[in-house]
Image (cartoon, rainbow, N blue to C red):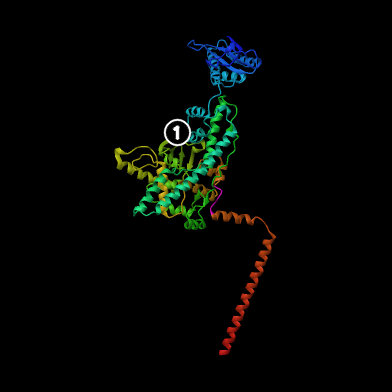
Amino acid sequence: MKGSTYRRCSCRDPKTGKELGTSCPKRNSRNHCKYSIRQELPTREDGSRRSFARGGYANVKAAQADLDQVRALLGLAESDDPEGTQLVAEMLAEVSGEKLPLPNVEETRRRLKAGQDLVGSLTVAEWLDRWLAGKRIRKSGISRYETDIRVHLKPHIGHRRLDRLRVSHLSEMFTAIADGNAEVLEQNAQRRAAVEELSTIPWKGAENRARRKALKAAIDAMPAFRRVTGPATRQHVKATLRASLNDAIGQQIITFNPAAHVEIDPVRKPKALVWTDERVAKWEQTGEKPSPVMVWTPEQTGAFLDFVAPDRLYTMWHLIAFRGLRRGEACGQPWSETNLDRHSLTVTGQLVQDGWEVEASEPKTDSGFRVVAVDDDTVGVLERHRKQQEADHAEWGAAWVNTGLVFTQEDGSWLHPGKVTDLFERLVAASGLPPIRLHDLRHGAATLMLAADIDIKIVSDTLGHSDTRITRDIYQSVLPHVGKSAAEATAKLVPLQRKAEQEEQARKAAKKAKQAAKAKAKGKKKAKAKKAAHKG
């Protein structure tokens, strides 16, 4: 195919505006003209012609070098590969039309063999859309990925070319997110102050009504209350991007994953704390929880279960409190996997929320599939619950929804996990006990098992943790009396001279006190005898 380099003069006739071309009087001057190249490309599938053209070269050597590179790129496709030939031609036509740099020959050869886009103009947003469309996971997982992409990744880095994404771009993104958090907090504070001011303005009086109207208009113009993007969310955004870029590497679209190297603030998971008397007293005074994760003592757990004994879902609260099932696992537990004769139940599924919709799903991890042993008392509670459910079935008759689940609504249909949480919070508030979350009831079960000296591996398996280290990391705190016993047992193992001296001093003091008591008693006896003799 034809191709050439040539000189081109861009001077124009001042009267007509047309290029002078070869008639330019300065054309023969050495540095007057720029060099250009033109290379004919394979025709399109409809037979129309196309070419690669580029100008502005300072000398013929630079022009010839680019022309040679264009021809090398054209030669990448085999003569018996018309599809490859068309792909290379389309790439060169796009590079020419958009004035993009010429692609590297070896990189283009690799992309052609791998069946990838030859022009690396794929944006991060385009790749994320393609990646998300190919994911085959449960809806809740897709929704979480979609939120990360829509709210954070696309607005900050979606416009960037995928093959040019760098660690610095991601650092800038997370810095912008942190700056946005400060703005959100400031706007929330302004709106909160305005709402509080509105509540202090009386309703009566024309002046007050005018003030209320003006303040309401100002509040409506303010941004709505928003949540900040916390450390856990930022880590999830990073994980989403890292997973998508790993897949891009697997498909040989890129060779480097910047999300694997960007540094952001770590997530500091709150430790579970027990509601001791001191913490309860402070909560009653201030209304503040010492930690987001709080655990009841055995006495508090017992008081709650006694309080909710009449509740229709008492058995669920009992099962979570003693066996540590997750909310979704309890809501999705079927009778077919609940063997009361063998004192066990098998966790094989769960009900999860996607927004406010509910769907059945398998456990999130392999460790979630597990057999949970059940004690005699819990078996009795489950048996009574089953009899009550059978009575409900008979009462509803043909309207009964046969889901086969242990815990259901009055008509046998699924429980909504979100509504279960709301009910639990209302029951806790009504009981007068210090507040915990429903998931903290599961934490309480773990703490009770550890306090009962159950092996950490059994506790971990019962809870469905994939590693005992997870169990140890979460449940650092223990019940107060257990910690005191452990402290005393530890102290007794270490012989101290100071302790021996203190014990000797204590013995001497006790002996001295005993002697003084005897002398005092003897003195009283003598005085009594003397008094009796005097009377006689």
- Give coordinates of residue 522: x percent, y percent: 61, 79
Q: At x 58% / y 89%, what residue is drawn?
A: 534
Residue at the limit of the structure toward the right, as seen here: 497
Residue at the limit of the structure toward the top, as seen here: 1
Give the magenta-colored segment's residue range. 475-479
Rendered-image quadrant of the C terminus: bottom right
Q: At x 68% / y 59%, what residue is drawn?
A: 496
Q: At x 65% / y 72%, what residue is drawn?
A: 512
| Residue 88 location, quadrant | top right
Q: Nearer the viewer, residue 344 or 341?
A: 344
Q: Nearer the viewer, residue 470 or 510?
A: 470
**Most frequent secondary structure within the magenta stretch:** loop
Kind of residue at badge 1 = Lys
Residue 98 among those drawn in magenta: no
- Give coordinates of residue 405: x percent, y percent: 39, 39
- Give coordinates of residue 407: x percent, y percent: 39, 42
Specify whether residue 465 is in view: no
Specify whether residue 394 is in view: yes
Q: Nearer the viewer, residue 391 or 486?
A: 486
- Residue at disc 1, secondary structure: helix
214 with respect to 93 (left or right): left
Crowd around label 1: few <14 · some 14–19 · many ≥20 (10 Å)? some
Picture layout, residue 499 above or below residue 193: below
Q: Nearer the viewer, residue 212 or 407?
A: 212
190 with respect to 103 (left or right): left
Which residue bears the numbered disc 1?
Answer: 139
Rendered-image quadrant of the N terminus: top right
